[in-house]
Amino acid sequence: MAEEVMVDALPYIDLGYDEAGVRDQALAMVEEEARRYRPTKNYLEHLPFVQSKTFETPIMKAEFERLAHLHPMETLHLKRYELPTPPAGKLTDIQAWQECVDNSLAQLEHQ
């Protein structure tokens, strides 16, 4: 009895997932743990209170404020991601097309 070890968590099993009885054994271990665990109303009460506002950045504060007031999230501006063709008067202009290609390459690099 003195050499018996009490395991308080499920062991990590690397092999044998498809062997007979492995799933049943794991479920039995979960059931045993659930039977022994008696949750309290606040199981963290013995720990000191964390001052989470200490870590809030101005951006986080603004986002929490937006959420608190149920304001919708600002939509993304997709205009910068558009790849326009040259204007109607310059559809045959090689330089205009080169500018469009350069724009697309710059956008690709940014992404």
Image (cartoon, grey):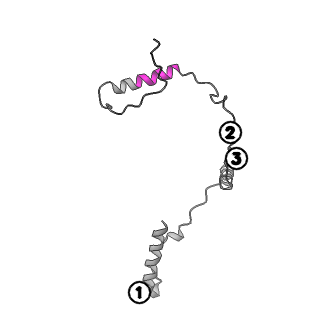
Q: Quadrant of the N terminus?
A: top left
Amino acid, disc 2: Val
Q: Is residue 62 above or below residue 6?
A: below
- Residue at image location 46% in from the left, 85% down from the top: 88
Q: Which x, y percent locates residue 25?
A: 37, 23
In which quadrant of the rendered view does residue 108 lie? bottom left
What percent of the width, then of the height, locates residue 8?
A: 49, 24
| Spatial separation of the CA atoms under disc 2 and disc 3 | 9 Å
Q: Amino acid at mark 3?
A: Thr
Distance (Cα) linking label 1 and label 3: 57 Å
Discs 1/3, front: 3
- Determine whether, in the image, residue 19 is placed left or right of residue 87: left
Read off the residue under disc 1. 94
Residue 84 visible (yes or no): no
> Which mark lies nearer to you, 1 or 2?
2
Task: Name the residue at 40% across, 26% down.
Answer: 26
What segment is highlighted magenta in the picture? 27-36
**In x, y percent, where is residue 78?**
53, 67
Say which residue label 2 marks: 50
Residue 55 or residue 5, whichever sits in front? 5
Q: Residue at x 50, y 23 (%)?
A: 34
